[in-house]
């Protein structure tokens, strides 16, 4: 009788240990965020991307490049990137050279022939790729700004869906579309909810953001400070995967880029579970945005990316 009572006492304890063990041994590793790159000229000269991969000792998932409406999206670039094993990502700037294309023109069908020719060419390439169009439409510096000229948030939504419809009607199902505003900033005029075209027209919800460092009108910000508010807003308005379509950190200017980069990889997993990809803007432009702007920054990126 005592043995039975002892066994009844031990059963729940043993079951608890078994459950604990199951949790420990069945645990899956934390997800890895895919890393893409924009390298000036890299889409047209893949050797530049290969050299960067060798230098860093990592493999990029995708390569991003820019194209505008003064030319067709280069199918040769799409094929080349795909042949090297990179996912092609085209930031399709809705402008003719420096002249913005107004949303109303798109809705009225004035650019249908151009849009459809691109859809057919990319469909026939039979390569999976993504187009990011109307990038940073919430920023007054963008040619696609929703407040520029006759543009409005409603017209932005209509122009967006108009383009996607043409691609779908052409059967270009290999092409997905990424919607990517700039991260929230002090001069925001529009809420993201009034700009978002809707889940039925968007495949990936993105955001562009940079740590500019100290210097008017900017200040040093951590990765989380740059992206958190916009991320939370995207989570509310979209059920799509979330990506960072453009990002980088400045070298110097009041902070430590190596520490920033190290913390970025930690924060991505801890605070941004819906982010699946980031694209690093690897260029010395307004600031030194390069991954390897210093040996310390390069090392931090290598460790985090592996």
Image: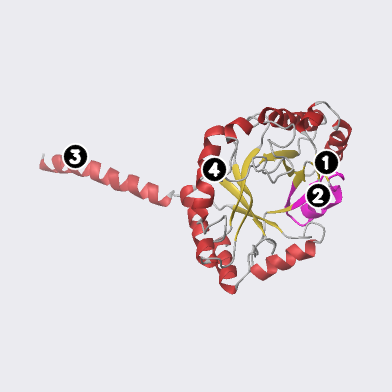
Residue contact at pointers 2 and 4, CB within 8 angstroms: no
Residue extent of the magenta highlight: 65-90
Q: In the figure, is residue 28 to the left or right of 107?
A: left
Alpha-carbon neighbours of circle 3 within 10 Å: few (<14), some, or many (≥20)? Answer: few
Which residue: 58% across, 58% down?
212
The tag on residue 231 is none
Q: Are marks 1 and 2 in contact (CB under 8 Å)?
A: yes
Instruction: Judge whether 66 appears above or below 181 on screen.
Output: below
Disc on the earlier residue, 2 or 4: 2
Instruction: State how far apart marks 2 and 3 are (Cα).
Output: 66 Å
Q: Mark 3 or mark 1: which comes first in sequence?
A: 3
Dot 1 alpha-carbon crowd within 10 angstroms: few under 14, some 14 to 19, many 20 or more: many
Reading the image, the residue beneath label 3 is 8
Q: Secondary structure at mark 3?
A: helix
* Residue that carries the numbered disc 2 in the rendered image: 78
Q: Earlier in the sequence, mark 1 or mark 4?
A: 1
Marks 3 and 1: CB-CB under 8 Å?
no
Q: Label 1: which residue? A: 122
């Amino acid at each position: 009788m005592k043995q039975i009572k002892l066994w009844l006492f031990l059963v729940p304890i043993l079951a608890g240990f078994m459950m604990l063990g199951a949790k420990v041994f069945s645990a899956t590793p934390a997800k890895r965020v895919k890393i893409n790159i924009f390298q000036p000229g890299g889409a047209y000269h893949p050797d530049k991307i290969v050299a960067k991969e060798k230098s860093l000792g990592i493999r990029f998932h995708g390569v991003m490049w820019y194209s505008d409406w003064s030319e067709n999206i280069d199918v040769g670039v799409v094929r080349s990137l795909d042949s090297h094993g990179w996912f092609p990502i085209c930031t399709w700037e809705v402008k003719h050279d420096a002249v913005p294309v107004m949303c109303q023109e798109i809705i009225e069908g004035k650019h249908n022939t151009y849009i459809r020719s691109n859809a057919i060419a990319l469909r026939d390439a039979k390569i999976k790729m993504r187009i990011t169009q109307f990038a940073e439409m919430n920023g007054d510096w963008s040619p696609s700004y929703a407040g520029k000229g006759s543009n409005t948030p409603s017209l932005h939504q209509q122009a967006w869906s108009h383009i996607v419809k043409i691609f779908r009607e052409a059967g270009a199902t290999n092409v997905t579309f990424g919607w990517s505003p700039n991260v929230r900033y002090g001069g925001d005029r529009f809420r993201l909810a009034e700009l978002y075209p809707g889940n039925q027209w968007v495949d990936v919800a993105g955001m562009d953001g940079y740590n500019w460092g100290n210097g008017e009108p900017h200040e040093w910000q951590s990765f989380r400070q740059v992206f958190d508010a916009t991320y939370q807003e995207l989570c509310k308005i979209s059920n799509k995967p979330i990506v960072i379509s453009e990002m980088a950190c400045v070298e110097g200017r009041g902070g430590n880029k190596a520490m920033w980069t190290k913390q970025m990889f930690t924060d991505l997993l801890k605070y941004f579970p819906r982010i699946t990809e980031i694209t690093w803007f690897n260029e010395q432009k307004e600031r030194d945005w390069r991954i390897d702007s210093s040996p310390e920054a390069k090392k931090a990126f290598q460790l985090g990316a592996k």
